[in-house]
């Protein structure tokens, strides 16, 4: 699924489009893979949404690390 997220450009889309994409994708996966429980589909959706978020900047956290090391 993560490869498909990248191929479809989900990380670059708006939050509304991301929600729509994941709603449709989870419906497809639920129909295609009957062995997945609702809890597993919910977890997969959560992981996919987290994966689609931009990376956090390390620059913001570096001063805090430097201050604790001193």
Image (tube, rainbow, N blue to C red):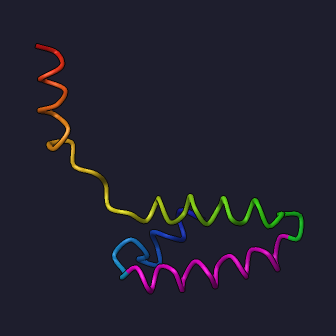
Residues in magenta? 15-33
**For residue 51, side relative to residue 36 (left or right):** left
Q: Quadrant of residue 13?
A: bottom left
Residue 50 magenta-highlighted: no
Q: Position of residue 34 (x, y in %)?
A: 88, 71
How many marks overall? 0
Up-down relation of residue 43 to residue 57 (above or below): below
Is residue 64 or residue 7 the one in the foreground?
64
Is residue 70 or residue 48 the one in the foreground?
70
Up-down relation of residue 4 to residue 57 (above or below): below
Q: Quadrant of residue 63?
A: top left
Query: Which residue: 62% across, 82% down?
Result: 23
Query: Which residue: 68% across, 65% down?
Result: 42
Query: Which residue: 28% across, 51% down?
Result: 56
Residue 29 magenta-highlighted: yes
**For residue 39, side relative to residue 35 (left or right):** left
Q: Position of residue 37 (x, y in %)?
A: 83, 63
Q: Position of residue 18 (x, y in %)?
A: 47, 79
Query: Which residue: 79% across, 67% down?
Result: 38
Quarter of the picture containing the N terminus is: bottom right
């Amino acid at each position: 699924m993560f490869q498909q997220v990248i191929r479809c450009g989900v990380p670059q889309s708006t939050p509304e489009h991301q929600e729509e994409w994941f709603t449709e994708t989870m419906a497809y996966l639920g129909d295609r893979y009957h062995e997945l429980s609702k809890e597993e589909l919910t977890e997969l959706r959560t992981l996919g949404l987290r994966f689609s978020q931009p990376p956090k900047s390390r620059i913001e956290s570096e001063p805090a690390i430097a201050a604790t090391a001193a």
